[in-house]
Amino acid sequence: MKQLTLADELFLLGQDEKSGRSAISEISLATGLAGGLLGELLLGGMIQLQDGRVAPLRQRPPADSVTHAVLERIVAERRLLTIQTWLSYIRQDAYPAVARRLAFTGVVTSVRTTGWLRRTQVRYPVVDLGVAARPRMRLRAMLAGERPWDPSSVLLALLVRAVGLEEVLALELTARQIRERLDQVAQSAPPPFVELSREVEQAIASPSVGHRRQH
């Protein structure tokens, strides 16, 4: 079974499966993915959050090349930079990096098209629908009380809330009910998870980040 990481799952929740385009503004999703990559390191015990800053821990680096590169950059930085600084830096390459990771495992494929003024665009439609549906199905079951929560799913839920993807989880529950239950999850989540998701939300709320869906 193909294993999905935290950022992988957020990417799949934020993509239109057929068109391969982001369901929200790409920079908003990229900010969430940056949070997801930091979250992967946090879940793996490779970083910790201290007073709004990211501190590396002396642990064996991850085998995955994407998170490995992020951790190397954090370790190389002698100062403890803020979460906002790292989100701003990581999101520059987060979207294509996570997309390529998913393409490598065969979950999505890359499609290049030439648009207006011969500008090349890359889309990432899903090719493995069964794998792509797993994060949505799991979160729906957890929000409905049918499955217990695990740490990675809690953080994924908070990032979904931070980037505004609640509607993709709506089925039996309405988007409003989803938001209310995500609020409940946040109330009992570990403080570092809440802090990271709050920083993602604040980064997206910055005037330089758009909110509208791209077409």
Image: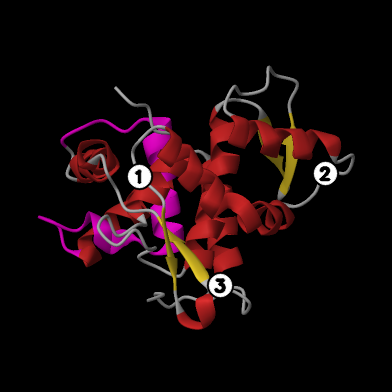
Q: Quadrant of the N terminus?
A: top left
Between 100 and 95, the one nearer to me in the picture? 100
> Mark 3 sits on what residue?
205
Q: Secondary structure under badge 1?
A: loop
Left or right of residue 105: residue 180? left
At 47% from the left and 82% from the top, the residue drawn is 116
Amino acid on which disc 2 is placed: Leu
* Mark 3 neighbour class, 10 Å CA radius: few under 14, some 14 to 19, many 20 or more: some
At 85% from the left and 41% from the top, the residue drawn is 77
> Mark 2 sits on what residue?
80
Amino acid on which disc 3 is placed: Ala
Mark 3 → mark 2, Cα distance in angstroms:
23 Å
Between 28 and 145, the one nearer to me in the picture? 28
Report the span colored magenta: 146-174
Mark 2 → mark 1, Cα distance in angstroms:
35 Å
In the image, residue 119 above or below residue 189: below
Q: Position of residue 42 (x, y in %)?
A: 59, 34
In the image, residue 19 above or below residue 145: below
Q: Secondary structure under badge 3?
A: loop
- Magenta segment includes 62: no
Amino acid on which disc 1 is placed: Val
User: What is the quadrant of residue 153 in the picture?
Assistant: top left
Res. 31 in view: yes
Q: Position of residue 2 (x, y in %)?
A: 33, 26
At 51% from the left and 68% from the top, the residue drawn is 120
Left or right of residue 26: residue 177? left
* Mark 2 neighbour class, 10 Å CA radius: few under 14, some 14 to 19, many 20 or more: some
Mark closest to the chain's N terminus, 2 or 1: 2
Tell me the tag on residue 108. Answer: 1
In the image, residue 164 above or below residue 108: below
User: What is the quadrant of residue 87 in the picture?
Assistant: bottom right
At 33% from the left and 39% from the top, the residue drawn is 107
